[in-house]
Amino acid sequence: MPKKYRFLLYPLLLNSFLLPELKADKPLVSPKLIEILRQYKPEMLQEGIELRPSGEELQQALFEGDTSLIQKIATSKESTNIVQNFAEIEVYQSKGAFQEANRQLEICNKNFFQDKNAQDLLSPINGILLTCSQMLIGNYFLEGDIKNWGIELNLIENVYYPAIQKFKGLEKFSLAVTKMGNLTISPDSIPPFTVTGIEQQQSVPLQFQIPIEEIYRRNAEKLPSIIASLNKEDIPFFLETGAAIGKLPTKFSHASNVHLIGHINNADNAASENYSGELGIVEELKIGNATLKNVPFLFTNVNQAYLGLMILQKLGKIKIDKQKMIFGKDVNCICQQDVHFGITFKGDHQVLKYPFYWKNKRNFAAIDLTQNNIDYDILTFKDKFLKNQQNHFFDVTNNVDGTKIKNPAYFTESNLSIDGIDYGKKKELVIKDTIRNPSTIIGAFVLDKGSLYLDFINHKACLMPDESDTQPMPQ
């Protein structure tokens, strides 16, 4: 199509079926949105920006999975109705209730949370629409709905971008959510990610013999893994509760029953270790009697195989203790509290978060069953140290994508309590790191005294004292 006609087509598409009816006195793109976007430097627009419904505090609350803080922000006197609407959606997101969150976001895409009788209606393309669209894209990815993830990406890139980029100074405008990854095939050709065989609970044993040895990443031993059948080949998989998408070594991408459909530029985990590679669909993955079809995986530079939360949430309800993983829809999950996920809008980050008490303070930590270390129990990254903390630090060397970086660090000790379970005195390693996201990680030792329940159906989670076996988890 000749370029001079291209912009004429987009408003027609927008008015016909993608956006609300364009009023005669309304411009296609909101002038307020244009004004806001022009405040960004061209290089920032090119790299991709993120539109946020409120300030940094609400974004940090979502990253921590702290629903109490999200609700507190929503009910504050300073919060507008729009912020309250987005906060309600973020509560659903942080519980992993993506379908309900998506239902609210689809309403937002139609009316921008406006009363239909409002006097001053927004233009069809506005900041609220773009905020909802980027949140919707992230949700689709986190629940493994790759088809709709691709459809929504196409909508932004082929409809919203051209309408905005024709304005002076916005020629390079882009959203960060579209930089995370892309499809190389039509989204309509992608089959749905499904699971069968989870009506009754079943059990698979845990193994602890295989170490994690990743180049430029972390190394660990005595971590729980299960045997699953990947396209009829038995493979050990680690339970990565600190990441969204499952990961497989690149060598598996050449199999005949693996279909490469796109590319992921950035997907991280609880320790802010970034991964990129080919996005592929595995035809079949069997875990016990459960059969998962058309399973999304990231094929990247790892030596081991990992099941992320995208896959684990398909198993219904899960109980993990020192010996086994039990899953299925009828697992007796007696948890009363909501599950917490720390996530980002883009969908490149999803981590199981859990409240814990440390030094008489309540905080949130990532529970990562692929993390373990004989020198410390808790790992914390901070972007700055207090003056009194700098007097007794030492240097630790980290490999970040092949580059050795020295960071100041220190040890601290205290009693640890999670869900009323007393883990006794534990050691924390605190590292000053301005590259990683500030976070705290608790490793697989939580299974030493507790059984981890994850109810992905009712969005609940808890740690219950494990009295079935007095033997500790392998160390």
Image: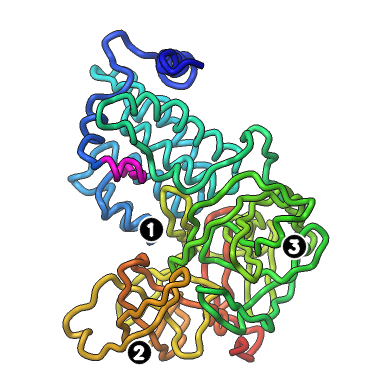
Q: CA distance from mark 2 to mark 3?
A: 39 Å
Foreground pick, 388 / 77: 388
Q: Amino acid at mark 3?
A: Ile
Q: Is residue 162 above or below residue 385?
A: above
Horizontal placement of 233 versus 78: left or right? right
User: Label 2 is placed on what type of residue?
Assistant: Glu
* Residue that numbered label 2 is attached to: 413
Q: Is residue 178 magenta?
A: no
Residue drawn at x 57%, y 48% is 263
Check residue 287 in the rendering and tell me which mark sits there, or answer none.
3
Q: Quadrant of the C terminus?
A: bottom right
Question: In this picture, which residue range is highlighted in magenta?
Answer: 42-53
Q: Position of residue 404 (x, y in %)?
A: 41, 77
Local secondary structure at mark 2: strand
Neighbor class of circle 2 (other Cα within 10 Å; few <14, some 14-19, many 20+) is some
Q: Residue at x 18, y 46 (%)?
A: 77
State the residue lying farthest toward the right.
232
- Residue 332 screen position, x and y as percent: 65, 64
Q: Is residue 290 left or right of residue 353?
A: right
Residue 421 in view of the camera: yes
Q: Residue at x 31, y 41 (%)?
A: 45
Q: Is residue 154 above or below residue 300?
A: above
Q: Residue at the top extreme?
A: 24
Q: Earlier in the sequence, mark 1 or mark 3?
A: 1
Q: Which residue is mark 1?
A: 63
Q: Can residue 456 be seen?
A: no
Looking at the rendered structure, the secondary structure element under dot 1 is helix
Coordinates of residue 279 in the picture (x, y in percent) = 61, 50
Query: Callout 3: helix, strand or loop?
Result: strand
